[in-house]
Image (tube, rainbow, N blue to C red):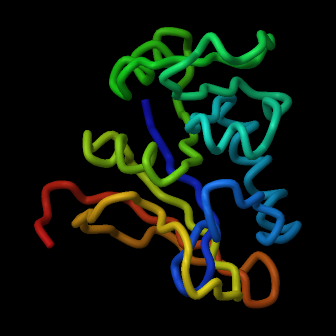
Amino acid sequence: MKLILVMAMTADGKIARHGDHFPDWTGKADKRMFKKITTEAGVVIMGARTFDTIGKPLPGRLNVVITRSPERYPPYDNLVCTSDPPETILAKLSDQGYQTAILSGGAMINSLFLRARLIDEMMVTVIPIMFGQGLSMFSEPMHMALELLTAREIDPGVLVLHYRFVYDRLV
């Protein structure tokens, strides 16, 4: 199964001002791209805080929420709440026929999957704004090599950088 991390970040490398910051700053082009990518994959994986910020499952795709308290979420047809480790989550999704999954944060969940070397690719939308401080894409230092696959402008000044993780190259 292929796992693609899809995130938007500011020009100074922040994914949010704080943990409860709603992602209303990314723009329409990024939101359209995110919807297209996640709907095509059919499944999006996120942490409880990210899900709580959104407030409800994203329609048209399976929402997998990683949480220590799965029982606190109401049932939805397209929502799975789990405390399983990343490898188990991906194995279950693969068993259900999914070929690609989208990882959409937050920083702790991104780190959990990257530490296990489970992320294959990363699509980062760079939004031409700065927060000065806030949350980084990962909650801990990460030293990974990346190979640029594509770079494209989806709106004036808004770039999407698509990378492949290269785990066998030291940085």
> Percent position (x, y) of residue 115?
26, 46
> Percent position (x, y) of residue 165?
32, 58
> Which residue is depicted at the point 48% across and 58% down?
122
Left-right relation of 160 to 87: right
Does 114 sit above or below residue 82? below
Give the number of marks: 0
> Which residue is depicted at the point 80% across and 34% down?
58
> Percent position (x, y) of residue 142?
27, 63
Does 75 sit above or below residue 161? above
Left-right relation of 167 to 124: left
Does 35 sit above or below residue 67? below
Left-right relation of 8 to 14: right
Closest to the observer, 150 or 63: 63
> Which residue is depicted at the point 25% across and 59% down?
166
Closest to the observer, 10 or 149: 10
Does 74 sit above or below residue 50? above
Closest to the observer, 51 or 18: 18
Q: Quadrant of the N terminus?
A: top left
> Which residue is depicted at the point 38% across and 46% down?
119
Q: Quadrant of the C terminus?
A: bottom left
Closest to the observer, 59 or 169: 59
Quadrant in which residue 19 is drawn: bottom right
Quadrant in which residue 11 is drawn: bottom right
